Amino acid sequence: MSNWTRDFFIYLSQNKFLNESAKKWGFRLGAEKFVAGTTIREVVPVIKKLNEKGIHVTLDHLGEFVNEKKEATLAKEKVLEMLDVMHNENLDSHLSVKLTQLGLDIDFDFCLENMKEIVERAKEYGIFVNIDMEDYSHLEDTFNILFELRKESDLVGTVVQSYLYRTADDMEQLKDVRLRIVKGAYKENDDVAYQSKKEIDANFLKLAKQRLLDGKAFTSIATHDHHIINELKQFVEENNIKKDTFEFQMLYGFRQEMQYALKEEGYAFCTYIPFGQDWFGYYMRRLAERPQNLQLIWKDMLYDDKGKVKRKPVAALAIMSIGLLYLSRKKKWEKAS
Ligand SMILES: Cc1cc2nc3c(=O)[nH]c(=O)nc-3n(C[C@H](O)[C@H](O)[C@H](O)COP(=O)(O)OP(=O)(O)OC[C@H]3O[C@@H](n4cnc5c(N)ncnc54)[C@H](O)[C@@H]3O)c2cc1C
């Protein structure tokens, strides 16, 4: 996808008005293909179906733009409820959380206290907690919270992004920590991050290989990229790396056949399942990554379930207006720079 299209969808993902409005729309724009439901109860059968096939699951209750303590407290309550359900239903699953949803943008200590409560409950149940990595401005705080939490439980880990120059150094400090390796989903400047796919992919392979050879803690290799997956499968064979030291991870709704195939080939596999009403930002980041998903949007915007043209394509108009605003601003920015 061209850079401006990617930038456009990342811009939409960060638009507060659209994120807030989308909560009221219900699932639209084809999002239901990538977001498993709105409540934990709706998602339990999806998890059970994957578990029956031997696939582990990581569960994320979606949430963006949390700027008030009461919203963060509500998010924490939801996560605690998720943990209870995961335990009571005996689901083969762990938790993924974003610190901004738990108050990181409000106050570091408040977020830490929320996380302590979550980690304590998860420890009681023996459930692993993964802290997702967000944009670069949150990276240091994320590591600081991780290290604080690990004083109380080993069942906490995080994510490293291969687009950041510093990741190899960070991983030196994280050898004992369970990690997920990803390419990185946010827009970062070239003073901190590689910009080209070639460099990001090469760094991903370098980091994953080094980590698998070190073998000190469990690793999740999170990508839909079959070139990378195939090269790592070969690397694992050649270096006799034990298959219980790592897993492949993909997002719910992506490359389903490949997810099953990897499991059948004897690799540990985990599907990342997002759910909740706050689907817009997550979905826009997925569109930024993959242009083919766009056809879902156009279909949903223009046609109803019976294939008839919608009379009031409100969502379409909102997105198009924001798109035009973005493009006009972009031209100004380009002229100014
Ligand atoms: C489980 C999981 C957790 C994540 N957690 C985080 C996180 O905490 N923080 C963060 O910043 N990012 C996270 N990400 C997102 C990640 O950083 C990337 O933005 C995202 O995975 C896209 O990169 P990719 O490696 O999957 O494939 P891309 O680089 O987008 O694609 C590479 C190639 O793979 C093929 N391909 C990709 N998708 C498909 C498809 N659906 N069908 C057919 N072919 C396809 C195509 O040939 C494509 O050219 C996560 C991703 C996953 C899978």
Image (cartoon, rainbow, N blue to C red):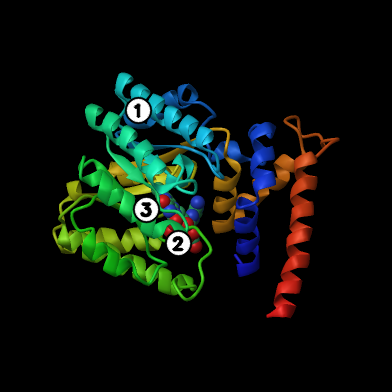
**Relative to 13, residue 212 above or below:** below
* Residue 96 as seen in the image, left or right of residue 172: right
Ligand 1 - quadrant of the structure image: bottom left
Mark 1 neighbour class, 10 Å CA radius: few under 14, some 14 to 19, many 20 or more: many
Q: What residue is pinned by disc 3?
A: 142
Disc 2 marks which amino acid?
Tyr
Residue 212 x, y percent position in the rendering: 21, 59
The label shown at residue 274 is none
Q: Is residue 221 visible?
A: no
Residue to which mark 2 is pinned = 136
| Residue beneath the point at 39% across and 27% down | 82
Q: Earlier in the sequence, mark 3 or mark 1?
A: 1
**Mark 2 and 3 residues: CB-CB less than 8 Å, in contact?**
no
SS state under label 1:
helix
* Residue at position x 40%, y 55% in the image: 223
Q: Residue at x 56, y 56 (%)?
A: 290
Residue closest to the eye, 231 or 134: 134
Kindly identify which residue carries mark 1. 83
Q: Nearer the viewer, mark 3 or mark 1?
A: 3
Residue 331 % position (x, y): 75, 72
As drawn, the residue found furthest toward the right would be 311
Tag 2, which secondary structure? Answer: helix
Q: Tell me which residue sits at (29%, 34%) in the image.
A: 54
Q: CA distance from mark 2 to mark 3?
A: 10 Å
Residue 100 rendering spot, x and y as whole percentages: 47, 46
Task: Say what amino acid the circle numbered 1 marks.
Answer: Leu
If the image is split into quadrants, where does the C terminus sit? bottom right
Left or right of 116? Residue 15 is right
Q: Earlier in the sequence, mark 2 or mark 1?
A: 1
Dot 3 crowding, Cα within 10 Å, few <14, some 14–19, many 20+:
many
Task: Indicate if the residue with disc 3 has its beta carbon within 8 Å of ligand 1.
Answer: no
